Image (cartoon, rainbow, N blue to C red):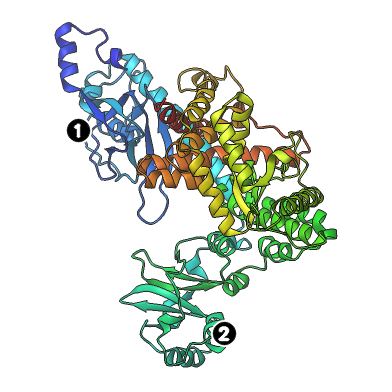
């Protein structure tokens, strides 16, 4: 485009054209075009990338497309330019082009724009006024370039529109209530029992009785939600407790209750209740005032009991002979959520909550099968995708067990022997029950039944210290798997002690972290140039999402977190903790979570489709099946994850 503007011109004419154009520099997240801007030209992107999006204060902003170098920003107003500068009558000789100075001066006003454009990263662009395009319209290359840009963009828009229509037609808005908003089925504020913190328990009980309400009351002062009181609070804190009816309601309320915005979806309310084990949710307006309340009963009335709710209740008390059936029921839930286009992060939260309950139940059954109760406190931990809350299909078992040092008893040797024998047998039973439930035994034997993955608190401290002190490749691989751990069952105090031991072990682990970083330096995420650019030129037709993107992402985040004292949490938790420590900026935190959501969406759906077709499960994504927009979305997501890896490596 640059050379076309001055092609076949004298030096003086070229200088005149150049003087009319201007190069602009934008930082990340700068707005290039506002919705209300009067657009009098186009931008030619020299470097960096931009996104076209629909701004919104009430809901998630929708990105329409990504604009890369050598592409134009502002094509939506080309129609306005052509209408103002070209005639509508038929040319006498179509071979002779009509130029802007031959056209009538009737000016058509552009339609107000609903979209904006902002820089994704540092961007440099050449602004080309429409007056320059008018002046240079006689150059065929200018017209050809503009036509190519418009037609290419139009093709992508139609393709994306078709995809959206196809997706929407798979969702029946009448029968599928997951697309309902909370405001559609909540109990509005005017019918919600409310009280002040200083009201008496007696007055609140009378108010609930008058309104024939047996659910809950929301405690509000000056439009701020302070708490919630349910019927169980009356039962446990008043009737069977020591509270008098003349005491103030704040003495029995649950403070700072979990709330949900009125614009949230049905599935968000459902997953919030399941994940937090609650049955009442105060609903808030945009300014965080009380809009109403939604209960589990409201959800059941809006939709027949779902597989999610049925599984939640069933898994709590499932018998050993029914463990094998649980997998089929859980997969049915996964299928429903994927078909209903529930965002992948919510889908994984729900599925991993259900899988946690299944594992929890397997451990309970294993303890019941033992002849005695555990001789000492213990904790059971998951590793791998289950620990990261990224499991959707049941994988191989990946776990370890920690039990308390028995140093307070007189016969230490005898007590230790009893604990060793007990937890050896318990671990075998847990592995066996998990296998019945559908978890295959780990081929690498990374299970609590292996003595390497079982031991006392002191033994684990020595083990971790050995890993960090003598960081061989084998130990580094063990550590990579270990540091994705997540507590699933056991004693909370022991879990806290275990975390503290890990933190203490990492105080002098700089060489260990350095060695981990060097492993990642040897396995870089593909860059935007090579080989990723060749991927989107279809020189490479497949991408291994697990090996080339997810593993480097997990390891880079893990190392960065350990460097800054973050030893526990899922990847999303660690991103949030690093943001709180000001290691990651707010914008990068938000973009990184959106990027990993995109990658996981491709990974989960691709792998689940293979499962449905009875194929061997792989993490390979066939790139030739992606639309242009999907490729751009994937490319941008990988780029952001690459930035995380580079940020981690910059410390070394």
Where does residue 82 sit, x and y in percent of width and height?
30, 30
Determine whether 23 is above or below 55 in the image.
Answer: above
Residue 26 in view, yes or no: yes
Find disc 1 in the rendering and name its residue.
105
Give the quadrant of the N terminus: top left
Q: Residue furthest right?
A: 321
How many marks on residues?
2
Work out whether mark 2 precedes mark 1 in sequence or the reverse, and give the earlier one.
1
Where does residue 341 sit, x and y in percent of width and height?
59, 50
Give whichever of 317, 539 is nearer the camera.
317
In percent of the image, x 15 and y 19: which residue is there? 19
Give the quadrant of the C terminus: top left
In percent of the image, x 42 and y 51: which residue is there? 60
Find disc 2 in the rendering and name its residue.
235
* Image side of residue 405 versus residue 326, left or right: left
- Mark 2 or 1: in front is 2
In percent of the image, x 62 and y 43: which residue is there? 460
* Image side of residue 534 versus residue 409, left or right: left
* Image side of residue 411 versus residue 12, left or right: right
Q: Which label is found at residue 121? A: none
Where does residue 80 sit, x and y in percent of width and height?
29, 36
Determine whether 524 is above or below 261 in the image.
Answer: above
Determine whether 206 is above or below 332 in the image.
Answer: below
Q: Could you tell me which secondary element the residue under label 2 belongs to?
A: helix
Q: Residues within 10 Å of mark 1 (few under 14, many from 20)?
A: few
Real-space Cα distance between discs 2 and 1?
80 Å
Q: Could you tell me which secondary element the residue under label 1 belongs to?
A: loop
| CB atoms of marks 2 and 1 within 8 Å | no
């Amino acid at each position: 485009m640059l050379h076309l503007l001055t092609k076949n011109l004298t030096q003086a004419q070229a200088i005149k054209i150049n003087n009319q154009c201007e190069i602009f520099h934008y930082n990340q997240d700068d707005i290039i075009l506002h919705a209300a801007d009067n657009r009098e030209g186009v931008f030619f992107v020299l470097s960096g990338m931009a996104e076209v999006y629909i701004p919104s204060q009430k809901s998630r902003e929708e990105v329409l497309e990504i604009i890369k170098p050598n592409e134009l920003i502002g094509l939506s107003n080309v129609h306005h330019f052509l209408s103002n500068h070209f005639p509508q009558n038929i040319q006498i000789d179509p071979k002779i082009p009509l130029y802007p100075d031959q056209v009538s001066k009737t000016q058509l006003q552009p339609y107000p724009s609903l979209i904006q454009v902002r820089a994704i990263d540092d961007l440099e662009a050449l602004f080309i006024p429409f007056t320059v395009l008018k002046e240079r319209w006689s150059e065929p290359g200018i017209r050809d370039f503009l036509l190519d840009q418009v037609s290419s963009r139009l093709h992508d828009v139609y393709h994306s529109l078709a995809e959206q229509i196809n997706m929407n037609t798979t969702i029946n808005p009448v029968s599928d209530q997951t697309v309902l908003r909370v405001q559609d089925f909540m109990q509005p504020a005017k019918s919600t029992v409310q009280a002040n913190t200083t009201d008496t328990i007696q007055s609140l009980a009378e108010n609930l009785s008058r309104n024939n309400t047996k659910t809950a009351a929301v405690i509000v002062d000056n439009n701020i939600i302070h708490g919630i009181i349910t019927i169980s609070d009356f039962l446990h804190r008043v009737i069977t407790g020591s509270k008098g009816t003349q005491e103030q309601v704040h003495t029995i309320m649950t403070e700072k209750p979990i709330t949900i915005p009125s614009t949230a979806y049905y599935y968000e309310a459902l997953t919030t209740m399941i994940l937090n084990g609650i049955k009442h949710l105060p609903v808030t307006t945009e300014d965080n005032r009380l809009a109403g309340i939604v209960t589990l009963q409201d959800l059941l009335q809006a939709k027949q009991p779902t597989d999610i709710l049925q599984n939640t209740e069933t898994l709590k008390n499932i018998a050993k002979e029914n463990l094998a059936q649980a997998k089929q029921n859980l997969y049915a839930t996964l299928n429903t959520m994927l078909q209903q286009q529930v965002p992948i992060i919510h889908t994984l939260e729900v599925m991993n909550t259900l899988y946690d309950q299944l594992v929890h139940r397997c451990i309970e059954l294993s303890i019941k099968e033992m002849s005695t109760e555990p001789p000492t406190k213990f904790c059971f931990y998951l590793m791998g995708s289950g620990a990261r809350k990224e499991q959707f299909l049941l994988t191989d078992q990946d776990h370890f067990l920690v039990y308390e040092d028995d140093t307070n008893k007189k016969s230490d040797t005898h007590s230790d022997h009893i604990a060793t024998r007990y937890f050896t047998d318990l671990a075998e039973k847990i592995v066996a029950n998990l296998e019945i439930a559908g978890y295959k035994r780990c081929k690498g034997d990374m299970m609590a039944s292996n003595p390497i993955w079982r031991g006392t608190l002191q033994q684990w401290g020595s083990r971790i210290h050995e890993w960090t002190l003598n960081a061989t490749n084998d130990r580094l691989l063990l550590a990579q798997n270990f540091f994705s751990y997540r507590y699933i069952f056991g004693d909370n105090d022991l879990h806290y002690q275990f975390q503290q031991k890990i933190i203490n072990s990492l105080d002098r682990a700089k060489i260990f972290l350095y060695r981990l970083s060097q492993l990642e330096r040897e396995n870089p995420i593909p860059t935007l140039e090579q080989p990723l650019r060749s991927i989107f030129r279809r020189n490479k037709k497949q991408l291994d999402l697990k090996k080339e993107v997810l593993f480097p992402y997990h390891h880079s985040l893990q190392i960065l977190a350990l460097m800054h004292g973050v030893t526990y949490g899922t990847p999303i938790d660690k991103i949030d903790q690093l943001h709180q420590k000001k290691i990651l900026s707010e914008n990068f935190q938000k973009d990184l979570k959106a990027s990993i959501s995109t990658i996981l969406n491709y990974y989960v759906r691709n792998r689940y489709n293979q499962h449905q077709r009875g194929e061997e499960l792989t993490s390979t994504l066939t790139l030739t099946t992606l639309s242009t927009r999907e490729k751009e979305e994937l490319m941008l997501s990988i780029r952001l994850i690459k930035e995380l890896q580079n940020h981690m490596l910059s410390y070394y």
